Amino acid sequence: MKKREVDLVVISDVHLGTYGCHSKELLIYLKSINPKQIILNGDIIDIWQFSKSYWPESHMKVVRRIMKFITDGVPVYYLTGNHDEMLRKFVDINMGSFRLQNKLVLNLNGQKAWFFHGDVFDVTMQNSKWLAKLGAVGYDTLILLNSFVNWCLTKMGREKMSFSKKIKAKFKDAVKFINDFENTAAELAIDKGYSFVVCGHIHQPEMREIKMHNGSVLYLNSGDWVENLTSLEYDNGEWSIFKFNAADYTDNDENEDTLDNDNLSEMLNVKSLFMNFKMETAE
């Protein structure tokens, strides 16, 4: 498959290190594109739930694919989120084309775009972090159960379903939280004079113009790689939401390369590193 040229790709909420992460699909997507810039907008690695007992090869391959972009000189910005907040101790690190930051402003064809994860708007995160962490474990368990149910539905020839989407749709508080999140981000972006505001965190892919009393802004959210399998792409001056569809990659075997076949024994070092992060966070 010929790689697609893309000016900018925004990915968030991958949650590597959890059972709900669709790392294989993300790897296929990363191998299908040739981006000029990449923004990893938080919660790429789930240090909250990281465990030495679960770090499959496909998760390591995603990390190494990102490293490949960096070694090829592609600018990669890693913006910290709440699940990888431990990395905030190391912000402003620059290594080659890699940048670790909390937020980012880019000039895109004369228009300013403001990128950040968005957990700063989450009241639960600010006041009851233990509750947020407990909720994360429950969410991962729900996704794991959902995966089993969808496997059964597929075997029976029935359409897949999303437990979390059904739950969110039934609870007005969840809908209100999403609306408040989007409006808060938009209002701040307008105050700062930005044309675009790009977030993650709420696992809700979105692209819409939000008009407020003080102006308007294009609000964008990259979604996630747990349920929605989405990213944002900016190319030729236009934004779009990419949604992964396995049927579009039927010839994926041709995308195998030497990077996939390398010995992955060094993943143990990565596990130890993230376990250290987790221990430091707990202190």
Image: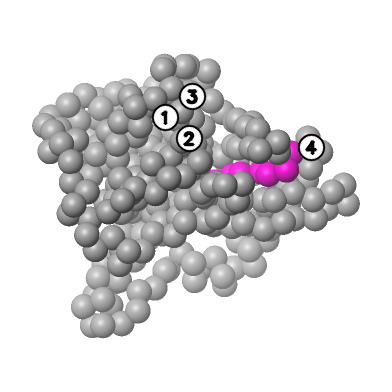
Determine contact: label 1, label 2, CB under 8 Å: yes
Tell me if mark 1 has few (under 14), some (14-19) or many (20+) residues whose alpha carbon lies within 10 angstroms of its own: some
Expressed as whole percent of the image width and height from the top left, the position of residue 201 reads 53, 46
Which is nearer the N-term, disc 2 or disc 3? 2
Expressed as whole percent of the image width and height from the top left, the position of residue 103 reads 59, 30
Expressed as whole percent of the image width and height from the top left, the position of residue 213 reads 88, 51
Expressed as whole percent of the image width and height from the top left, the position of residue 21 reads 33, 50
* Tag 2 residue: 37
Determine contact: label 2, label 3, CB under 8 Å: no
How far, Cα to Cα, is label 4 from label 2? Answer: 23 Å
Residue flagged by tag 4: what amino acid is it? Answer: Gly
How far, Cα to Cα, is label 4 from label 1? Answer: 28 Å
Element type where label 1 sits in the image: loop
Q: Is residue 175 above or below residue 197?
A: below
Q: Which mark is residue 74?
A: 1
Task: Identify the image quadrant of the N terminus.
Answer: bottom left
How far, Cα to Cα, is label 3 from label 4? Answer: 24 Å
Residue flagged by tag 1: what amino acid is it? Answer: Val
Tell me if mark 3 has few (under 14), some (14-19) or many (20+) residues whose alpha carbon lies within 10 angstroms of its own: many
